[in-house]
Amino acid sequence: MTQQRYQNGKQVIRRWDEVFKAVTAESRRQLIISLADANPDETVPLPESAVNPNVPRDPAVLRQKLYHCHLPMLSDYGFITWDTDPLVAGRGPRFEEVAVVFESLQSNATDVPDPLVFGCQRLEQERQERFDDPVAE
């Protein structure tokens, strides 16, 4: 029993480490959000689905970073699938493990500290909708 708990604990730690590593880059966060907004069996176009609308990047540079860094990492963890022609991404078998982080943040947008909300279009929108909804109060 103790050995099983140890193994389960190690696996959970590894999974959380992968989730948090996956969300350390803005392009990866934007891609995950784009996929969460899409239907489960749809793909999203790249690089445009990995761009923060408040801070646009050079599409050619972003495409190269996606291709050589971000997409392989997310794919290796099973969070996404991707194809090169055209460059698109879809949900992987472990997508929900990373998507839940953003779902949790969005559902608790009123509790997220202001410095993490202002400038983040999605959290600003969620917070505003909650303040505008009289049922939420």
Image (tube, helix red, strand yellow):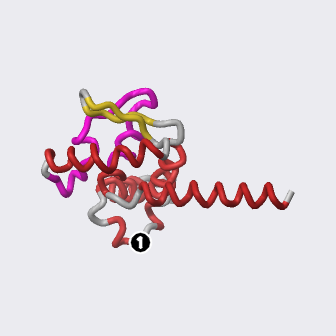
- Determine if residue 136 is in view: no
How far across and how far down the image is residue 14, in percent? 58, 57
Going by the image, does 119 lie left or right of 94?
Answer: left
Q: Residue at x 21, y 44 (%)?
A: 63
Q: Nearer the viewer, residue 26 or 119?
A: 26
Question: Does 60 appear above or below 25?
Answer: above
- Whether 55 is among the magenta residues is yes
Residue carrying label 1: 113
- Determine if residue 119 is in view: yes
How far across and how far down the image is residue 49, in percent? 27, 42
Q: Residue at x 35, y 35 (%)?
A: 89
* Amino acid found under the numbered disc labelled 1: Pro
Q: Residue at x 56, y 58 (%)?
A: 16
User: How crowded is the residue under tag 1: few (<14 C-alpha within 10 Å), some, or many (20+)?
Assistant: few
Question: Does 91 appear above or below 24?
Answer: above
Q: Nearer the viewer, residue 113 or 79?
A: 79
How far across and how far down the image is residue 64, in percent? 21, 46
- Whether 32 is among the magenta residues is yes
Quarter holding the N terminus is bottom right
* Residue that protrudes farthest toward the right in the picture: 1
Going by the image, does 96 lie left or right of 125?
Answer: right
How far across and how far down the image is residue 70, in percent? 33, 49
Going by the image, does 39 lie left or right of 46?
Answer: right
Going by the image, does 134 lie left or right of 52?
Answer: right
Part of the protein shown in magenta: 30-57
